[in-house]
Amino acid sequence: MTGLAVLIGCIVLLIVAITILKVHPIPALLLAGLILGLASGSSVEVVTESLLSGFGNTLKWIGLVILFGTLLGEILAVTGGADVIADSVIKIFGIKRLPLAMAVIGFLVGIPVFVDVAYLTLLPTIIALSRKSGHSVLVLGLSLASSLTVAHALIPPTPGPLAVAAILETDIGGMIPYNLIVGMVAVTGGLIWIRFNKKNLALRMPNEPVAMGRKEANIKGIKRILPFVALLFPLFLMGIGNVFASGNPIISFIKNPVWALLIGVVFALPLLKRKEFSKNLNEYFQSSGAKSDTVILISGTGGAFGQVIKDTEIVNTLLPEAGGLAAFGILLPFLLSFMFTTVTGSITVSLITTASIMAPMVTNGSIHPELTAAAIGAGSLGVIHVNSSFFWLFKEVHEIATSKILKTFSLLSAIVSVSGGLMVFVLY
């Protein structure tokens, strides 16, 4: 358990540095990763390579996604497109049920689209809904984020649940009903906590778009369709691409979040006035870059810290301890998955690792395969905290203090996980 003790110590040091000593997250994450690697027995060269690899791999796919997602949000916010979408959501669900609306949207969108991309794409709608409804942006954001992660962990065809089904040799069709029930209960548990903690979730609105202090002309006629197309079509393209095989070059193109979001931006361009079109668009790019640069860098360093955790193979040092927990029955996959997510910061790593451990017990018939898969998915929601890149992305886009997000976002993820776990035990 030495490796685990070192990791816990580094995480505590990281939290203290950021929350109490007010060290910026970028150097804090890098130094924490360096200390963790060195304390685990690696050389400076190996740890540095691990940090750079994690930073590069994270930014390789999320850097341009954040930029184009921010650009799309900038255009929708300033042209009034986000207001058009917000008005429609309010009209359908009503103001009182907006947290539920965000949860429903997140649950549906989170099935085919990765959490980070989906959240960034829907961010301008969250902000517009908050301004119009009086709901805290944190209430709506947490409602969306929790349901996105639940769908990501439990509902195929996301990669994690598919991997669990393959490893456990379980029929996906038989697994889906259990996972759906557990997922809906998990989201409900999160919504109940949010409802009773609204007073603690107050948050000032983020800054208005930097480039423009004005709104474009009111969107009228056929153009009122464009905000919905710009927002939903990229999600549709990514969803279609992840449902079907990617051997087709067209499918491979449209499923890529970078190109899908860029297509969304193209659909939003007619919302801009023709007068000084190029000048205004360049200003949007400038302001989007200014708003997203810190988010990109912190997401990258969060990925770097997570890569060090993976490369030190701390998870593998915990595997021998798992054998002594067999007496816990159906509780075992939940506990292991919960622990692995909390330790590694990766839901996918947690799903695959736990499924690999549980596979022999499933194949010999000593434990229910579908319920085991559901327990693994519920547990993998774990505690999302400083070793998760999505934690830092959420923090930066909403400009939240680290201490506050630990008390809200991290606590909520644990409550959602436990809620889903309790449902598994009821079904068991």
Image (tube, rainbow, N blue to C red):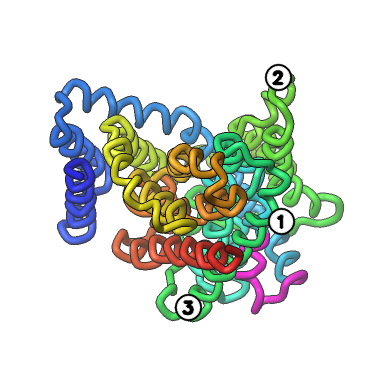
- What residue is rendered at 55% in x and 35% in y? 167
> What amino acid is found at the position of numbered circle 1 in the picture?
Ala
Q: CA distance from mark 1 to mark 2?
A: 43 Å
Residue 213, compared with residue 343, is above or below; it is below
Q: Whole-percent x and y of residue 294? A: 37, 43
Q: What range is drawn magenta here? A: 91-104
Label 3 element class: helix
Instruction: Specify few, some or many for label 2: CA neighbours under 10 Å numbering under 14, 14-19, or 20 or more.
Output: few
Q: Amino acid at mark 2?
A: Gly
Whether 201 is drawn above or below 398: the answer is below
Give the main secondary structure, helix, strand or loop, of the magenta stretch.
Answer: helix
Quick one: SS at disc 1? loop
In the rendered image, which quarter contains the N terminus? top left
> Is residue 389 covered in magenta?
no
Residue for badge 1: 217
299 to 197, vertically: above or below: above
Name the spot of residue 176 as percent of width and height, x first: 68, 50
User: Is residue 27 visible from the viewing direction of this image?
Assistant: yes
Image quarter where the C terminus lies is bottom right
